[in-house]
Amino acid sequence: MGCKAVKYELVSGFETHIELSTKTKIFCGCTTQFGGEPNTHCCPVCIGLPGTLPVLNREVVRFAIKAGLAVHGKIAEVAKMDRKNYCYPDLAKAYQISQLYAPLIIGGYIELSNGRKIRLHHIHIEEDAGKLIHQHGDTYVDYNRGGVPLIEIVSEPDIRSIDEAKEYVEKLQQVMRWVGISDCKMQEGSMRCDVNISVRPEGTEKFGTRTEIKNMNSITNIARAMEYEYERQVDLIESGGKVVQETLRFDDATGTTSSMRSKEDAHDYRYFRDPDLVTITIPREEVEELRSEMPELPADKFERYTDEYEIPEKDAALLTKYRSISEYFDKAIEGVKSPKTVSNFIIGQIFRRLETEADKEVFDVATTPEQLCELVKLLDSGKIRNNLAKSTLEKMLDSGKGATDFISESDMGGIDDSALLELCKNAVEGNPKAVEDYKNGKEKAIKALVGNVMKNSRGKADAKAAEEKIAQIIRNA
Amino acid sequence: MGTISKIHEMLTSKQVSCKELTESYLRGIESDNTALNAYVCVTGDEALKTAEAVDKKIAAGESIGLLEGVPMALKDNMSTKGVLTTCCSKILTGYKPIYDAAVWELLKAQNAVMLGKTNMDEFAMGSSCETSYFGGAANPVDIDHVAGGSSGGSASAVGGNLAAYTLGSDTGGSIRQPASFCGVVGLKPTYGAVSRYGLIAYGSSLDQIGPITKSVEDAALVFDAIAKPDKRDSTSLGAKEDTYSKLDNDIKGLKIGIAREYIDGVRDDVKEAVLAAAKVYESLGAEIVYFDLPVLKFALPVYYIIACAEASSNLGRYDGIRYGYKTAHYNGTHDMICRTRSEGFGEEVKRRILLGTYVLSAGYYDAYYKKATDLRGTIIRAFNNAFENCDVILAPTVPMTAFEKGHAVSDPIETYLTDICTVPVNIAGLPGVSVPCGFNAKGMPIGMQLIGKSFGEATILNAAYKYQQAAPEKFKDTKWGVKL
């Protein structure tokens, strides 16, 4: 046919729901705790009994403002609540109280590692719905989740690849956890993404027709769904077809998407101002107060670590993955010469003891950052050598004790050259077997000799220098 | 007449025990409710229990409050724990709330003796009480006439002496119109003065609970008792001031405004009665000023768009899943909800849900709902301007007197027009009190309406009280119920 193969660019925008970890629900005093016996975290208000009225939990507004500040959004001076009307058994009032006309946060962005900024359209607050439980051939409703506060973060269609999409979600998750407004657990549903996706020939401006994918409970599945949907749309266009605007459901088992409802069947939510709730005013003092309470954000920490401390980007990313790690690191580097050494200890030795992501997030280690700091300072001052520091840290992590519990005064200070030479000679003389092995080409045998020197120097010797000296002695013998 | 103050005096002077009093009201209901159909639920046992408690206090020499031991009733759209609350709709068949409405909490705490729940138009949608699932309430002045609506049962019970006072709710005139039809006093408070918590919503931005009473003093007393701020209703502020203690203030120099648009187009007998009341006010030293309020012509469409839009959303929850009526045979959840709603709602409710759904739907929102809310602002500003030149606005409550039964059902549009004088007050959130001011040739009562500034209940109740003092003959009792 002589057709030139067209490359297609992916265009995607995200609608991300995040459950806020306020103690109580958005419009009543019920607990927001996950789980619980069905319909035990409920009251007349959150099951929408006739005559009940919602009262806005101000803490939700404050949490949402923190979210807004975390993504550099503009905090509205006045915001309003609207009703989104639709009928579904898990929605007790047949409308969800949400925001359409005057959301709390306008704009903002998430910056990716490639320097691109994914702009946010807005962030609004709303209530979660209950859950349907299908059991014994019947359907039951559990309203425990009904009324749990959510924010919905709506991005512009700025995402251009699946990698960007993954990073966008990770960054969002990271920063929202960081500022303490949510645990963002996709598996438990406290973070949920709807993905809008379209394709267009590379180099063109006009957006293609988009579809919306729902029902993905992990970043991996988001990527799988997007990959499938990208290919499907490209294939469709290539074979002369047209993408139809519709809502799709992702099937985890098959890795495919299927139609939930077409554009024609799209809900008309008949949004209108909720007359039961008064206008929310957000005094600038409140915003400033919250701003002053904000922790240093991960992106800022990352920049500080890489620019000021010359920590490699890969390591800086690990240190800033969770707020707990970076706070530990920040405490441990106080007054040390080389923050990079601290970073190496954390990533090299402490991380090895934290098996799961959850462990890393909690970052519950026996050694306090102050203790690590003390150890690194000994290293900085040349009082101990790196290998002693390393082995001491292991003992510290095992016991929770400080460095000085394992290192005596006499251990401190290096040993001079002649002393080292003496120790090396002793090692060679006392281990003829190892020397023989080494001579016969078994290079590893020298390690035993070095070990002997280290042992007899109580770790004060420099292992590398010792190895060189031993090799020289054997050669010259 | 069985007013609150009279009952209080009888109780404290031990002319009658609270139990005897309550029993006589219950007997009255038993004999006359068949004719009046004012009650849809009678709670005799509970009433007697409260009465006995009040009697004990009196016997022990304790002082009792003015509302203590006084037999009363609530409109059936106010939640009462453990007591049927159906909004006179099939769809709430068997529904017993698990909590009390804020107003009932307040009155219960004062040992109010609740006799039962009163009849109303289904979900307060109607002007005759005839959309009630239980059939309409009759007008105690002439039972061939409607009591009005939607709080028809509440007005009928007070006019028919089957309760000393009742609470009604007013979304577009539902307290004032039946009060006017039945020849009693009805106060629609400022939006936000009385908590809506527990009031089953019709039009949330318009709904307000208020008293229906035999006298202006009683209206003031009950209003003072229920107009308290409530944290559970974000729109609730409570009253600005006590009204009962401010009755009988001099009204010399009070500027009473009459908007020409309110007078034009009402029936002659109504117009004459209202203008005669204006003369009474002049004789009391008030000044009558005429002015134009052309925005009133928008009031009715604005009202029906906003009220129906809110209702279409408020009534979405009646799906048969959690409480109330549920269809017997269905095929799946969707079908169950459709059938339940089709069978459970009456014609007028369906009409308003459809209307409300339409005005909010994509493509029509701007032309209807948004325009209506914009015009609502215009109407509010027009009232604010009017109040720069007067203290109180005097108007007819309804353009006509109570119509004969069956009339409303035959012509919904004409029935909607009966709300023309009352809805502007709801749209603007203002207080309005309807007071009897005469009778037509057939002896049916005519009501006039005094409209006040926001939170100006004390001013309008005082003006109403002055009129009541000057023209007591307009406050006539009926042959029904309890005679004290």
Image (spheres, rainbow, N blue to C red):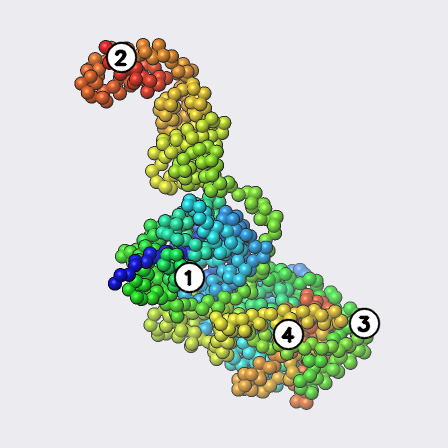
Residue corresponding to mark 4 = B424
The secondary element bearing badge 3 is classed as loop
The secondary element bearing badge 2 is classed as helix
Residue corresponding to mark 3 = B253
- Disc 2 sits on a residue from what chain? A
Task: Tell me which label, 4 or 3, sits earlier in the chain.
Answer: 3
The secondary element bearing badge 4 is classed as helix
Left-right relation of A4 to B236: left
Q: Position of residue A29 (x, y in %)?
A: 51, 54
Q: Is residue A440 above or below residue B229?
A: above
Residue corresponding to mark 1 = A206
Please tell me if label 2 and label 3 are on a single chain: no
Please tell me if label 4 and label 3 are on a single chain: yes
| Disc number lying in front (1 or 2) | 1
Q: What is the number of the mark on residue A473?
A: 2
Q: Is residue B233 visible?
A: yes
Residue at 81% x, 72% y is B252
The answer to whether the residues at label 1 and label 3 have Cβ atoms under 8 Å apart is: no
Total number of numbered discs in the rendering: 4
Q: Position of residue A186 (x, y in %)?
A: 38, 51
- Disc 4 sits on a residue from what chain? B
Please tell me if label 1 and label 4 are on a single chain: no
Query: How many other residues sit within 10 Å of disc 4, few (<14), some (14-19) or many (≥20)?
Result: many
Q: Position of residue B342 (x, y in %)?
A: 42, 76
Quadrant of residue A259 within the rendered picture: bottom left
Mark 4 is on which residue type? Answer: Pro
Mark 3 is on which residue type? Answer: Gly
Q: What is the number of the mark on residue B192?
A: none
Mark 2 is on which residue type? Answer: Ile
Please tell me if label 2 and label 4 are on a single chain: no
Pick the front one: B329 or A468:
A468
| Disc number lying in front (4 or 3) | 4
